[in-house]
Image (spheres, helix red, strand yellow):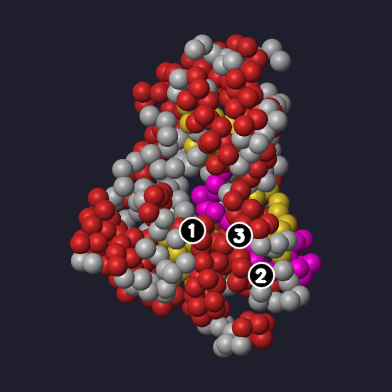
Amino acid sequence: MSFPLNKQLVDQICTDFGLRNAKELGNASIRQLVGVVSNIEAATGEHFIHMELGSPGLQSERIGIEAEHKALLAGYGSRYPLIYGIPEVKHWGSEFIKAFVNINIPEDCIIPTVGSMQGVYALVRLISQLDPKRNTMLFLDPCFPMQKQQCKVMDMPIEAFDIADYRGDALEHKLEEYLSKGNIISLIFSNPNNPSWMCLSETELRIIGKLCTKYNIIAIEDMAYLDMDFRRQSGRPYEPPYQPSIGHYTNNCVHLISSSKIFSYAGQRGAIVAVNPVLAHRVYPALTQKYGNNGEFLWNFIYVILACLSSGVTHSVQFAMAAMFKAACHGEIDFVNNTREYARRAEQIKTIILRNGFHTVYDLDADNQPVGNGFFFTFGYHDWTGEKMLNKLIYYGVSAISLSSTGAAREGLRGCVSAISEKEYDELDRRLALFNNDFSAS
């Protein structure tokens, strides 16, 4: 089938997924979009260029697989795991953070979760109950859309602003504007950022940390892409430069480290929540009143919130995470060099996109440095909205997500490089050239 695809067929598939037509794809969830695209592929026989889902495009670390296999053969599959984590994952999780972030988080403050998705959900549920006078989450946008959805599911109010226009010292004034109102209890951000791939500088992290201490705000730092700012020669255990972290500037913080991207282990849903020890052992009267316990942050996180969400993280997955953390600390896994493949792909794909009339939406980082190449990138077309781009590109066999779903103040799409192989570069070039030929004058 030639491009563009049959409009009636594509619109019918969109309707089947609860949308009125392809024009509504910009409002679809990522998983809904994946379903639409999969059905279009099945109906047309045309393979899409997939840029919508941030799923790893590399092989899982063999050490993790072997550790899981060994644990299952040893009979751990028949036993409930410890809700607070097996000793191995707590020890090597703590050591991993020391080796690559240069932060000391005690073993008792390392808690495994079923991916960072569960980690954030549990944290938001707990944090929303800490202070009856403060109940709002602040997002440093753009952000991973599902984290806002989690707040919505739990009826936690949110506020947000796009940090792209408030870099460096300007960030302090903007944060003061929000935090001084007295309704914010926590803020959340990823670094590198999903979707823009901007990276917060040490200056900016120092500002955030200082204000979190000043206003008693809990910072949730999502390190899903730890050490994946490939402009830096990082990734050597116990050697600088380390992953930048707010943990160097405040005790009011929690760190999320997932095995999904750094170890390409997304399918097994393993992550750790690392709670700063000062915050971990802080007592909140509101928790004591509500649950009749000691009111400690960490105790309630584990035994009240997580205990309601699952019976712990899969036993074999905990052994896998422990093995991968240990191997990375010993230099047996070079996860930074392995994931550098994403930067190589991004460089090629961005060249193709720019050649065919598109532009980079988030192009500058702190200090006006170009945004680096990595797992995600952003792109726009003329002055089109992201929704318009998406509902036109879908007919050319190219899928991505709208930046508007991430809270971005700028229009365009987020693309992920992980599912695009080198053999698809020429086809991507061909499809975007057809697209540009059809719309360049519009």
Question: Which amino acid is tagged 3?
Answer: Ile
Residue in the image at 48% along x and 25% along y: 41
Distance in Å between CA atoms under marks 3 and 2:
13 Å
Question: Which sits in the foreground, 286 or 279?
Answer: 286
Residues at marks 3 and 1 touching, judged by CB atoms closer than 8 Å: no
Residues at marks 3 and 2 touching, judged by CB atoms closer than 8 Å: no
Q: Which residues are magenta?
A: 176-195
Distance in Å between CA atoms under marks 1 and 2:
18 Å
Q: Quadrant of the C terminus?
A: top right
Residue 116: image tag: 1
Upstream in the sequence, badge 3 or badge 1? 1
Mark 1 lies on a secondary structure that is helix
Q: Is residue 197 above or below residue 137?
A: above
Which residue in the protein does label 2 denote? 128
Residues at marks 1 and 2 touching, judged by CB atoms closer than 8 Å: no
Mark 3 lies on a secondary structure that is strand
Picture mark count = 3
Question: Which sits in the foreground, 233 or 398?
Answer: 398
Residue in the image at 63% along x and 12% along y: 438
Q: Choose mark 3 or mark 2, whichever is in front.
A: 2
Q: Does the magenta portion include 287? A: no
Q: Residues within 10 Å of mark 2 (few under 14, many from 20)?
A: many
Residue in the image at 50% along x and 19% along y: 44
Question: Which amino acid is tagged 1?
Answer: Ser
Q: Choose mark 3 or mark 1, whichever is in front.
A: 1
Q: Residues within 10 Å of mark 1 (few under 14, many from 20)?
A: many
Residue 196, position as x, y percentages in the image: 57, 42
Q: Residues within 10 Å of mark 3 (few under 14, many from 20)?
A: many
Which residue in the protein does label 3 denote? 188
